[in-house]
Image (cartoon, rainbow, N blue to C red):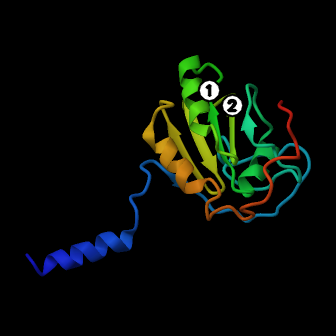
Amino acid sequence: MTRALPLLVLLLTACGPKSIQGLQTFTYAGGDHRSGSLVYTENPPAGGPHNAMWQNCGVYDRPLYNEYAVHSLEHGAVWITYRPDLDAAQVDTLKKLVEGRPYTLLSPYDGLDTPVAISAWGAQLKVDKADDSRLKAFLDKYEQGPTAPERGASCSGAYGETR
């Protein structure tokens, strides 16, 4: 048994930090700017073609255009979306979660198939409650994370309107 312990430690170290349960990942190339309304594979989108203008990071009380928000994801932003009928206490919990984080978007999202979804470039997690600890783990991992093709590019000074 003592001989197996170092192998177990090696295997655990090689696997890296614990992954986020329920996390879905996708592969998208960056820099694909297009005009008009676009169709996305994920709902909400987690990458792909997008408008040449990005969405200003911040908290919004109305839905955003996918095409602008996806460009913000390309810059390293994380987009938290929630059903428009989510109760106010849960929305407040989400607002506190993004408070002080400069590369986040928070907005309601029509037609969401789960109460809350969190998306970054090439990654997404859907949860039932705003206080799910996986939301913070996702934010810590993906805000300005390594999957963003243009990590560090601006998340302000562009499009600030809603749908």
Horizontal side, residue 105 vs residue 97: left or right: right
Residue ID for mark 1: 83
Q: What element does badge 1 sit on?
A: loop
- The single residue placed furthest to the front in the displayed view is 100
Percent x, y of residue 32: 83, 61
- Check the picture and name the quadrant holding the C terminus: top right
Would you call the spot at circle 2 few (<14 residues within 10 Å), some (14-19), or many (20 or more)?
A: many
Instruction: Write the residue at 59% across / 25% down.
Output: 91
Give the spatial CA distance, label 1 vs label 2.
Answer: 6 Å
Would you call the spot at circle 1 few (<14 residues within 10 Å), some (14-19), or many (20 or more)?
A: some
* Residue type of the residue flagged with mark 2: Tyr
Q: Which mark is residue 109?
A: 2
- The single residue placed furthest to the right in the displayed view is 35
Viewer-proximal residue, 42 or 89? 89
Q: Quadrant of residue 49?
A: bottom right
Picture layout, residue 93 above or below residue 6: above
Instruction: Write the residue at 75% across / 43% down.
Output: 57
Picture layout, residue 145 above or below residue 43: below
